[in-house]
Image: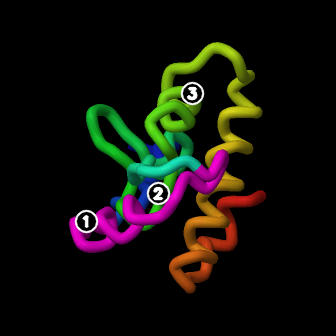
Amino acid sequence: MSGLKSYPKSTYKRSKTFLRAVAELECQNCGAYPSQAAHSNWHGKGMALKASDDLVAALCLRCHWEVDQGNKLTKDERKALWLKAYKRTMDRLGLLAVAHLGE
């Protein structure tokens, strides 16, 4: 089968403890509380598979809905909103954001 590329299988991290820590933060977009761990829709997501648990942002229900199903923002604006909230979430938890996500 020449011409086919082989890609390494992604490793997905799963941690209920980490997701709970994220959900304890206020929304990193609008400041509302409570929030929930909103997985990325753009990084490592596949058919019926959420992105890795280390790719989550603390978003309230309204902001999470806007990122996932909303129609007020363009796809690029929704991605930018999530990315900004993700970076703030990692900062609030004292963690480094995955460097390549912003580019």
- The residue tagged with tag 1: helix, strand or loop? loop
Q: Which mark is residue 56?
A: 2
Q: Is residue 16 in the magenta section?
A: yes
Residue 15 at what x, y percent from top left?
A: 25, 69
Residue sitting farthest toward the top: 71
Residue annotated with mark 1: 14
What are the residue bounds of the magenta stretch?
Answer: 12-31
Can you tell which mark lies on residue 66?
A: 3
Instruction: Between residue 45 and residue 28, name the one nearer to us.
Output: 28
Q: Nearer the viewer, residue 27 or 14?
A: 27
The alpha-carbon separation of the residues under discs 1 and 2 comes to 11 Å
Q: Which image quarter is the N terminus in?
A: top left
Q: Residue furthest bottom?
A: 94
Q: Seen in the image, is 17 located left or right of residue 69?
A: left
Amino acid type at mark 1: Arg
The overriding secondary structure of the stretch rendered in magenta is loop
Whole-Å distance between the Cαs marked 1 and 3? 24 Å
Is residue 44 shown above or below 22? above
Query: Could you tell which of marks 2 and 3 lies nearer the N-terminus?
Result: 2
Residue drawn where x is 50% and y is 40% of the image: 41
Please give the name of the residue rendered at 57% of the width and 72% of the height, measured from the top-left corner.
90
Secondary structure under badge 2? strand
Label 1–label 2 contact, CB within 8 A: no
